[in-house]
Amino acid sequence: MKTQIAIIGGGLGGLMTAYHLQAKCEDVCDITLLEASPRCGGKMVTQRFHTVPVLYEAGVAELYDYSMLGPDPLRELVAELGLDTVPMDGQTVVLDNQILRHRDDIRRVCGAKTLKAIDSFRAFATKMLSPEQYYEGSSREDNHHPLSRLTGQRLLEQHVTDSTARRYLRVASRSDIATELHLTNGLNSLKNFLMDVDGYIKLYSIVGGIDRIPQELLTRLQHPADPDTATVHVRYNSPVVQVGSTPDGRYRLVVRDNGQETVQEYDLVVLALPHNWLTTVAWADDTLAQAMGRHIAYYDRPAHYLRVSLLFQTPFWRSEITDSWFMSDAFNGCCVYDESARHDAGGYGVLGWLLAGSDAIAFANLDDQTLIQRVLDALPPSLQAGRELLIEGHVHRWMGAVNGLPGGLPVQRLKDAHVPAPEAHPGVFVVGDYLFDSTLNGILDSADITSDLVLSHLLKKHYQPSIVLPGPARRTLGPTRARTSRIDRQYFDTYRGLGPYADTYQRFFNAAYLLDMIRLVWGAKPGYRLLDAGSASGVTLEDFSAFGVQAWGIENNKYIYAHTPDKWLKRNILGNVQQLPFPDNHFDFVYETCLCHLPASRIERAIRELCRVTKRGLIFGSITSDLDSEIIKKYDLLRGVSTLSTWWEWSEAFLDYDFDMALSTPEPLALAWQRTLQAGQGPGAWYEDDDSLRYCFYTKLKA
């Protein structure tokens, strides 16, 4: 029987979760997406003016491009959907009615002292957060960062003494922060200040409108290219008013459909709602109600937007401002988009004002016509004549639509953030941009993580007596008869179903490849000391030794250890990875394949021990739930696995204990991926893509 999954919410989070689940679980699940409104897409709203059919963005305006720093899943998705993009850029700031287009304007109007103060602060910001740290954004680094406990307001007050420079920086960043500096922390503020610094991010939009992303996703969800892939069922005008549990561990949803309430049951539930909509759902189960109450309270940092879009006869401002947008000190700092720079307006001009924070709340109380007049009044004097060219205007209010402190404080581990009640309700998941950075990139990451967690849940649930895996119908792992999941004699005598371990281990172990990766990642040549954690009978030590590596092994299974050749008995040790019999920093590198066979409660101790004995780095080689499903099935890889987690879940564990990702920049990653493909370790073997490769190499941090 297929697993029934309900996704509540048809914004990008819900659509992306469905898209990932459709790809990862294929025909194993039936997915129903329940959307309260008559459309999907949430905050992604592209509209046309009534007078002239010219496009403008009424909600989300742009996407962030991180591809210069590493893999960019959203950029890859846009390409996969066949969408064209248009770059966006802006440097102009309007301050005290003066148009400051560049550094020379700042120096001329504000003075050299102010320019120096702005430059000094940006230099300080780059020291406090490098592009690599900005890109990775791990919870460990965020929580330990010295600015995480400081408000954004105190950050500016302490590090910018020039009042004009302080105001310039606040105006330039406010529409990105979407709240007041005293309501968010210094680190979140710093990340938004750095958006204007070269080397951190680029911005772009979608040709034809940003809501083409949800449109294309819907097409693929409802008409998948692979006929064996399950279709996602989308139900509009179907708000979920209550979520509860059933005695048999399923979930009961009360759905209002055309005024009538119906009760539906599902195996798993994904809440892909904006944070401010979670409170509209009633929780029938007390433990779930308490867990969701804690979740909602943890991220309750509402931030606000108000968008005013105006159509003009001509783009009259371009004689003075040619950027895709400019920042204005009106409304305590707002962004003004040149919508006609990204959408062909046929000679007309479109400006879109984005008010943020407290001003968005205050001005949301005004009627549309008054608001339109207010934003026209905010044009600098040199552009005031353009108000006579107004044709049409529209207002869109997005109160509480984003988060003023994305990720919360402290930032939670990803699984904790996405599974509010892991013990009592492991089948309830949440997706949201408020868990990351209040961007489309963040919600894509959240959806990807949730789909991984769902896949892990299904694999764990179905492993006994046989695990049902994604793929063509009737695909199962092994025979349907009951079988042991323990690592016993038979496990090694018929290793991965191929034969005795000593005769078959090289199908899964390639010393030359591993040593090449160590050379590429750390620049180390053979001659170093290496520990194989999970060394079985120690035959891998012979392979390492052939390349000049001084290798040791640690193994806890007595049966396979007894097969250790006499030559390697002194170096292959029967022991416990949680209590290694080696001094600190004894090995240059550790290659591990044993962590997944430990219970979750013992993982922390084991990683601490591996870190203790390692001087330089660790190669992670354990089984994960996001390995290729065909490979999992073919070689019965889940047998004996006690902790089944994703690559990114393991990475969080390593990052928490004095390790950092070793492949954090594009060029080394590209070289490592090329070598991986040459070794036949790529798609269909072990690593599905270069992103999965990133999660397997860790550098020990210096004390």
Image (cartoon, rainbow, N blue to C red):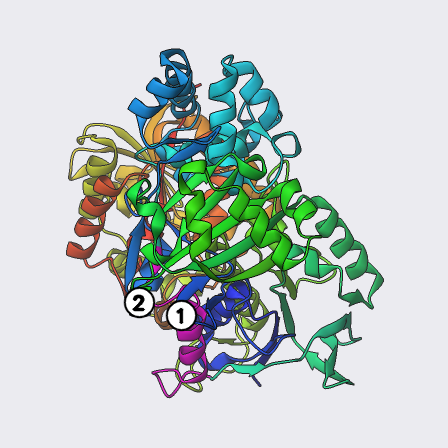
In the image, which residues are magenta? 205-230
Q: Contact (CB < 8 A) between labels 1 and 2?
A: yes
Secondary structure, mark 1, is helix
Residue 50 vs residue 18, the one in the foreground: 50
Estimate the spatial distance between the alpha carbons at disc 1 and disc 2, rounded to whole Å. Answer: 8 Å
Residue 271 vs residue 634, the one in the foreground: 271
Which numbered dot is residue 212? Answer: 1
- Vertical comparison of 224 with 343: above or below: below
Residue 319 vs residue 264, the one in the foreground: 319
Residue 475 vs residue 311, the one in the foreground: 311
What residue do we see at 29% from left, 60% from top?
A: 85
Secondary structure, mark 2, is loop
Q: Determine whether, in the image, residue 433 is placed left or right of residue 107.
A: right
What residue do we see at 29% from left, 62% from top?
A: 347
Q: Tell me residue 142's x, y (percent).
A: 53, 33
In magenta segment, residue 647: no
Classed neighbour count for the residue bearing mark 2: other residues with Cα under 10 Å, few (<14), some (14–19), many (≥20) = some
Q: Looking at the rendering, which quadrant does residue 423 occupy?
A: bottom right
Location of the C terminus (image quadrant)? top left
Residue that numbered label 2 is attached to: 83
In magenta segment, residue 211: yes
